[in-house]
Image (cartoon, rainbow, N blue to C red):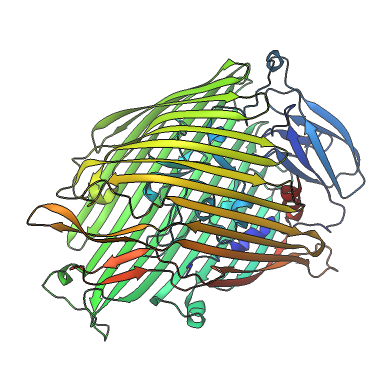
Amino acid sequence: MKIHIIKYITVAFLFLLAPRFVFSQHRISGTVKNNNGEAIPFASISLKATGEGTKTDTAGTFNLPTNAKGKQLLIVTSVGYKTFKQEVALADSSIYLDIVLQQSDAQSLHEVIISAGSFEASDKAKGASLTAIDAFTVAGSNADVALALRSLPGSQQIGEADGLFVRGGTSDETKQFIDGTLVKNPNYPAVPGLQQYARVNPILFNGILFSTGGYSALYGQAMSSALILESADLPEKSSAYFSVFTANMGAGIQELAKNKKSSYGVTLRYSNQIWYNSIIPQRINYFSGPEYLEGDANFRIKTGKTGMLKFYTNWNTSNVGMHNPDIDSVALRSAYQVKGMNSYNNLSYRDYLNDDWKLDAGLAYSYSRVNTIQTLTGADGQIINLPNSPFNGKNNHRIINNDFAQARVVFTRMYPHNQAIRFGAEHFYSHDHGMSNDNTVALTDNLTAAFAEGDIYLANNLAAKIGVRAEHSSLLSKWIIAPRASLAYRLNDGGQFNFAYGIFYQEPQNDFLYQTTDLHFSSATHYVLNYTKKAHNRFFRIEAYYKQYKDLIKTEPIISNDGKGYARGIELFFRDKKTFKNLDYWISYTYLNTKRDFLDYPDEIQPTFATPHTATIAIKKNFQDINTYVNISYAFATGRPYYNIRYDNITSISRIYDQGTTKNYSVLNLQVAHLMSLFKSWKQKPFSGFSVGVNNLLGTNQLFGYNYSANGDIKMPLTLPARRYYYAGFFMSFGINRTSDILDNNNN
């Protein structure tokens, strides 16, 4: 069962519900591009008379609601471009504009105009960008950013664990960043064999950048991938909502100041699956929850003409407890319960110091407490302690508290022709303390990093980004130097080749460092080559890559950095928002050849979380006449390997006693949302909607692998908690509603 599927469905309607019938309000929307038809992100759009304004998103689109009437002067500005002015007549409820900015005189010296947003040897050129709407509306993603990104190339279809498994890497090798700062604990505490979902609310983000390799020197401690999230600025207007879904209820407000220079917001959500599980039979016998309580708050303050100060805080608790038959004895049961508490806080500030200098700074602090209890019980539920192996290791109690803090500052010096130098530093503080059975756990690390990179244009159609990152860990007493380099070559037809190289380091996980600190950084060297072309609302990308792993963690015969591995493959991605009216779809394919020798693996073998072939399709259809949206996603993956690996104490080596390949993975998800307007006589009419959906619509029996008994005689399949998951709910919004945004997203 998808234990947390409803968590963000309520918030998703904020993108679907808009004041289409609110009296006296107009809407100016459209796109901002350059002469080559390339989107210009973060361009400023404002009305001169009223001061109302907004910015374009990463796709170059904007939406400016206003109560102004009559003729108004619209002004559009962006660094490196001439100011655009146009008089608009606000007589109708909405105006759509396609705006083209001309490069400033300094930039026009180039024969071929280069846009920093789409032609740059950067993460945005090599990665795949999504908007929050994209993440919300991928069927089966549960409005979870990480799950939505599994529909993009490079990601593996993993149904029994949370996080992103990218290009032969574990989920721990993908890190999430919000406005440059690391999200230490992005998911709820892990539960064996079950996905846990994201804590962070994706509605906060203007842009979602998924870099699957070769990312910027501004980020570190991620060997495989970086998920870079850009938080939204001020909301369009004040709003409120409430919702009731199958196993979730929530409410929230966003209040915009009258001068439109500050805002604050608060939301509260509660989810409990007990009622749903009593109706839909589950494979798992839950004795507690799954239960989640979450709240968040934010404020945003515009400082001066270009400054923005933003604060976000999120706190949550979770409780999941379940009984399973003990795999080593038919007469006994194994109980597992995890209680989690987490607080995440992020303060960021950005400003242009003058025409040439920009400052980005951030502070983050998080606290987490994970209480895990594992017990062996009899049929009567009483705890049983047995002295013999393997039963003597089945009663465990662990409490881990973690304090994590980060401070970060980045300076950008901008030069003519879109060239720039960025440099900065950051410091990470991490402190674990707690207990594991009768043993005390304590671990403290101070990691300091400095970085620099430059954007250099070598010719009219050739650009490079060269960077370096240095890190020092006080716990490991080690220094590392990580070079990064990217090169981009633009063709006359608008296509582009990108090449990236870099070394990416990562500290061992804390579970290994609890046992020994005589370890060092693991690393992965990336080589990436791709070709991209974007035109007429269609995007195509083909990419080849090679990764070489060094110093991976081995657990047998002792914990060490003796592991190694590689990953290589090719990926295809095509997105089309033009061919079919009101329909957006994308197709992705991933070929992966990877092996690694790590943990207790006896040699380099294909890991259990990797499969050679993966393909996904995401379809989003808007039926305008009836205000209904239908989202469909389908994923296919060839089988993954499974092993029974045990350590032989006599020969002092690990051996594979059983192995095989699971059957192919295939899943079809469906979501339908309908919007409506209730209480039409109200002056400020609320807007409402309901959503229904089914995950794994065809009821395919998914098999993710096996758990083995200690002697290997018994193996139990890892499958979904239930063949299908159903959800339905109702939502009502007072204020912001973005139906027109959805229409523009599908039609432009």
Residue 195 in which image quadrant: bottom left
The residue at the far left in this view is: 650
Residue 672 in which image quadrant: bottom right
Q: Residue at x 68, y 27 (%)?
A: 493
- Above or below: residue 10 compared with residue 55: below
In the rendered picture of this protein, how many numbered marks are placed on residues? 0
- Above or below: residue 94 compared with residue 547: below
Q: Please give left or right for residue 101 compared with residue 701 in the image.
A: right
Q: Please give left or right for residue 453 compared with residue 491 in the image.
A: left
- Above or below: residue 367 compared with residue 348: below
Q: Nearer the viewer, residue 491 or 69?
A: 491
Residue 273 lies, in percent from the top left, at 49, 74
Quadrant location of the C terminus in the rendered image: top right
Residue 425 in which image quadrant: top left
Q: Residue at x 51, y 51 (%)?
A: 313
Q: Residue at x 76, y 64 (%)?
A: 686
- Above or below: residue 63 compared with residue 698: above
Question: Would you say residue 360 is visible in this rendering?
Answer: yes
Q: Nearer the viewer, residue 523 or 613?
A: 613
Residue 389 lies, in percent from the top left, at 13, 69
